[in-house]
Image (spheres, rainbow, N blue to C red):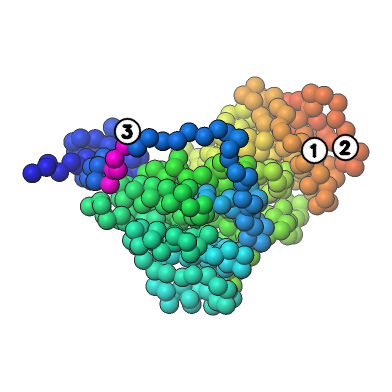
């Protein structure tokens, strides 16, 4: 009798080991190894006899099929200009963030132009119908099915659909494998089958993947390298805004975002997100600062707020929402070492308004300005925006797409911009530009403004 071949795979990082251990050598997580049939044994079962492959020239490729536009502009842009026939997209996100809602809307929008199947492994057909009614898309010709068996799905999709949404990959299974749905090997094998099918028959497949507690899809990030496009659907709990972010795209730019708002009738596109992330009643408050950021190709203005208050704790708090806490520590250290301003025994709170998460270093100057304004108890000019990267010596470095940022700011009525000192001559007559070479120049500027109530040091 053939010996069953199994291995132990880490549900967090996907590393495989011949023996069980309490700790994964790959990523260091505990209790994450689970016994599974090897993918090898699965492949052996389904392997075909080796055949000669035929080579072709690069020129032989027939002209690419036109992209499928859904008509949901925010979605189309994040995909790089619509869905590419035969491509596989992975849409990841926390459970309950709105993936099924978004993709049912996308399926409904596309079903007028192409045959589109929506296959749910999580909800019953009635539940999906109820949702469709709520989204007011019940009359669109979406082919709805509920199953979790990949074999059945592929057999049914053949020659009937151009686009298929699989919700979600964690519920799907291939029969040849003994492991439970949702385990690394099932998720991998199911996705592998779907991808093979998509490429062979030119069907576009959109796979939904839940992000688990550790922040990776299906436990391990096993799918990211297999699929053509990876989109994450994000949002802060308690906020209505949802952001669709492209992190990998073989057919378009990455770092592109689409902004949606969750309403009682599903997800609505937000055409002017800058207005959304700026608070509506901007008054003269200390610690509030507008950052002219860039998300993908799109400039975006966001408000950064900080609060510095005396601390009663031996180790003062540093709380950050929407930005990197390591980067905040760095800015605080630069302020102390290069500008002589210390927050030593005070609590520092930093918040990016609207539930957005910023990862650009260009926000450094805006964060520093917000902190300086809090420290000096002086509001920043109301109609000013900030951007620039701060180095460890306190120097302010140029950032990319300066013009696009300034244009967006001008469009929204801002008149002054604190920017990094340009390396080559740069003008923008519509706005007052205040070039800064060093952070101390900004500290001096605020110092001047706050003369009567100057507060320096901790
Ligand atoms: P869902 O798409 O089921 O999330 P996921 O598939 O990512 O798990 O979204 C569920 C949430 O969205 C739920 O909390 C209710 C909310 N929602 C609305 O606010 N309005 C709507 O029209 C719909 C359909 C859902
Ligand atoms: Mg869902």
Per the image, the residue denoted by label 2 is 428
Sooner in the amino-acid sequence: mark 3 or mark 1: 3
| Residue 283 on image: x %, y % | 76, 55
Q: Are marks 2 and 1 in contact (CB under 8 Å)?
A: yes
Q: Residue at x 27, y 56 (%)?
A: 175
Q: CA distance from mark 3 to mark 1?
A: 44 Å
The answer to whether 216 is drawn above or below residue 341 in the figure is below
Q: Residue at x 61, y 46 (%)?
A: 64
Per the image, the residue denoted by label 3 is 26
Q: Residues within 10 Å of mark 1 (few under 14, many from 20)?
A: few
Q: Residues within 10 Å of mark 3 (few under 14, many from 20)?
A: few
Q: Are marks 3 and 1 in contact (CB under 8 Å)?
A: no
Magenta includes 348? no
Q: Quadrant of residue 267?
A: bottom right
| Residue 50 on image: x %, y % | 31, 37
Q: Which residues, given as a range, are shown in magenta?
A: 46-50
Q: Residue at x 76, y 52 (%)?
A: 284
Q: Residue at x 18, y 41 (%)?
A: 5
In the image, 341 versus 404, the foreground residue is 404
Relative side of 408 to 195, left or right: right
Q: Quadrant of residue 7?
A: top left
């Amino acid at each position: 009798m053939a010996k069953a071949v199994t291995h132990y795979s880490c549900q967090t990082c996907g590393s495989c080991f011949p023996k069980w251990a309490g700790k994964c050598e790959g990523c260091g997580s505990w209790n994450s190894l689970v016994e599974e049939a090897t993918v090898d044994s699965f492949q052996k079962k389904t392997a075909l006899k080796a055949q000669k492959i035929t080579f072709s020239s690069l020129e032989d490729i027939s002209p690419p099929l036109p992209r499928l536009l859904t008509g949901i502009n925010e979605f189309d842009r994040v995909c790089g200009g619509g869905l590419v026939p035969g491509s596989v997209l992975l849409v990841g996100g926390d459970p309950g963030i709105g993936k099924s809602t978004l993709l049912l809307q996308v399926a409904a929008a596309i079903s007028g132009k192409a045959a589109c199947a929506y296959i749910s492994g999580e909800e019953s057909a009635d539940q999906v119908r109820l949702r469709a009614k709520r989204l007011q898309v019940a009359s669109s010709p979406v082919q709805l099915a509920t199953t979790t068996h990949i074999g059945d799905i592929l057999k049914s999709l053949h020659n009937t659909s151009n686009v298929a949404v699989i919700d979600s990959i964690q519920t799907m299974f291939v029969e040849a494998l003994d492991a439970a749905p949702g385990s690394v090997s099932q998720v991998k094998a199911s996705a592998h089958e779907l991808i093979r099918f998509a490429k062979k028959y030119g069907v576009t497949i959109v796979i939904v993947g839940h992000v688990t507690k550790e922040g990776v899809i299906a436990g391990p990030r096993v799918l990211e390298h297999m699929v053509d496009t990876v989109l994450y659907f994000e949002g802060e709990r308690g906020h209505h805004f949802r952001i669709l972010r492209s992190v990998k795209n073989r057919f378009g730019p990455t770092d592109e975002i689409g902004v949606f708002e969750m309403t009682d009738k599903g997800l609505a596109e937000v055409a002017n997100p800058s207005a959304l992330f700026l608070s509506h009643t901007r008054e003269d408050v200390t610690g509030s600062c507008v950052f002219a950021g860039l998300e993908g190709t799109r400039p975006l203005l966001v408000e950064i707020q900080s609060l510095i208050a005396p601390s009663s704790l031996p180790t003062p708090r540093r709380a950050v929402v929407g930005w990197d806490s390591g980067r905040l520590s760095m800015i605080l250290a630069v302020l102390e070492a290069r500008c002589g301003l210390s927050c030593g025994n005070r609590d520092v709170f930093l918040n990016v308004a609207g539930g957005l998460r910023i990862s650009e270093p260009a926000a450094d100057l805006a964060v520093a300005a917000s902190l300086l304004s809090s420290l000096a108890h002086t509001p920043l000019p109301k109609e000013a925006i900030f951007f620039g990267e701060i180095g460890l010596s306190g120097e302010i470095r140029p950032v990319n797409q300066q013009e696009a940022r300034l244009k967006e700011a001008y469009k929204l009525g801002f008149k002054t911009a604190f920017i990094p000192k340009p390396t080559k001559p740069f003008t923008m007559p519509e706005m007052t530009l205040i070039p800064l070479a060093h952070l101390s120049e900004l500290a001096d500027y605020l110092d001047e403004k706050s003369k009567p109530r100057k507060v320096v040091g901790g």
